[in-house]
Amino acid sequence: MAEKPWDGRFSQKTERVVESFTSSINVDKRLYSHDIAGSIAHCRMLAEASIITKKESAELVQGLLKIKKDIESGRFKYTDSLEDIHMHIEARLAADIGKVALKLHTARSRNDQVALDIRMYMRQETLAVIDRLTDLREILLSLAGNHTGTIMAGYTHLQKAQPVLFAHHLMAYYEMFSRDTERMRDCLKRIDVMPLGSAALAGTTYPIDREYVSGLLDFPKVSANSIDSVSDRDFIIEFLASASICMVHFSRMSEELVLWSSYEFNYIELPDAFATGSSIMPQKKNPDIPELTRGKSGRVFGSLIALLTIMKSLPLSYNRDMQEDKQPVFDAVDTLKACIEVYIKMLPNLKINKEKMLHGASSGFLNATDMADYLVTKGMAFRDAHACVGKAVSYAIGKEKELHELTLEELRFFSPLFSQDLFELLNPARMIERRKSFGGTAPENVLRAIKKGKKDIGRERKK
Ligand code: ARG
């Protein structure tokens, strides 16, 4: 075999610097198991189509399986002079089993081979992400289930707005991660398409059977256009977009955990095992996990931008630029999975300061809307009621009192419609209980949402 499988027409040796510049082996060696599985399916098909003999195919398969073992036991040697994982495996096969190895690459190209490998990798990882996101959603459901009586201040503009159940707040994240799971499932439809047999770009002259390969590798669909098959990386971009949105959700949750664990809020305490101290300030307990998660979202967005930029303006079909897809996608997959993993471990161990949360919901005029709604039930138009309560709030601020601490007499100064039955409406539990509109924070709604979530997950797990 020539030193490089493609150097037949070359008369000069490759420059060292070119070898290291063009090599992707350090990155794409991760694809080895998919590469070998793809090659095995390919040689089975070659034999089935009588392009090689059954005996040759069996020798190739055996050789490939041995290489897999060698890689997994750490005996495999990598070198920059062999560019990528595909070349490494092929060269090693030739060294191990001799001439018959030279038949493996019949009717395929590295262009469709790498497209197959990355699709198999993406399929495996997307399924893993879906699986762990489902576990995370389950944890959110059970956490919410424990807090259907825990009251907190709900915020808009980071200003106290109206009281809500902590469970309702948690269920908001459940909804976000459910959409993320759905997006991943949708991505999977575009990932799960079999490109092998497109060869370099135009298909091949051999009588190959692409459906057969597809069946062996468990793909529901064969790619339709050979040019598109070797140039398409949309499925990676789509995954990275979904991963980025998911990281936005992690980042928002992280931001809240950072805030809530601060001395000023003190709504939650992070488990000691998930925080660190300061090397100079002995009193510190820092929320590193949420902070790092918030920070790592930037890496995943970066991967998305990298892929979009790599693919933008590339002429059809394959271009070597596309080799740069792997590092960002591997990094994004690792980062997303690590964030899901650490949250799965951390969330059930959060300490929730229920009293602090309730206290936060009991002051700061969170009952102003309910007071205005009360006036509406007594016949006032909402805008007028809004203005009237606004004046009462301003008065109460001057008196350093909450709305419910004003006397009926004081309130009647703002409207004669106020009477004693107002006061029982102004406490947080009652305010929450009355928000029964679909999707609102009333306990019965939240309990129903939790129940539905459990049912949905049960159904998803069976798929
Ligand atoms: N290492 C290459 C990649 O990852 C494999 C395909 C190379 N194809 C080629 N025509 N040079 O994209």
Image (cartoon, rainbow, N blue to C red):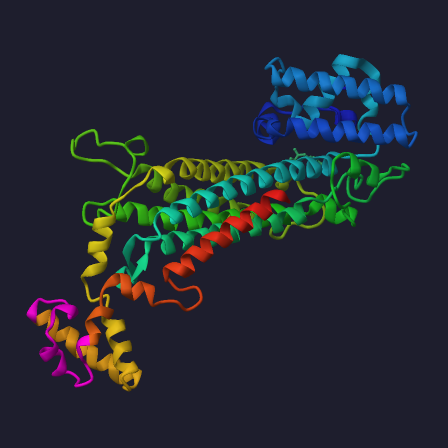
Ligand 1 picture quarter: top right
Q: Is residue 444 above or below residue 23?
A: below
Whether residue 377 is visible to the viewer of this picture, yes or no, is: yes
The image quarter containing residue 23 is: top right
Q: How many marks?
A: 0
Residue 415 in magenta stretch: yes
Q: Position of residue 87 (x, y in %)?
A: 70, 25
Compared across the picture, whether 446 is left or right of 87 comes to left
Compared across the picture, whether 379 is left or right of 178 comes to left
What residue do we see at 62% from left, 13% from top?
75
Q: Position of residue 86 (x, y in %)?
A: 69, 28
Quarter of the image with the N terminus is: top right
Q: Is residue 137 above or below residue 381?
A: above
Is 180 in front, or is 295?
A: 180
What residue do we see at 17% from left, 76% from top?
420
Q: Position of residue 145 (x, y in %)?
A: 39, 48
Residue 50 in magenta stretch: no
Q: Is residue 347 above or below residue 32?
A: below
Q: Position of residue 351 (x, y in %)?
A: 28, 40
The image quarter containing residue 371 is: bottom left
Whether residue 84 is visible to the viewer of this picture, yes or no, is: no
Is 86 in front, or is 413?
A: 413
Q: Magenta span covers which residues? A: 399-420
What residue do we see at 10% from left, 74% from top?
407
Quarter of the image with the C terminus is: top right
Is 391 in front, or is 100?
A: 391
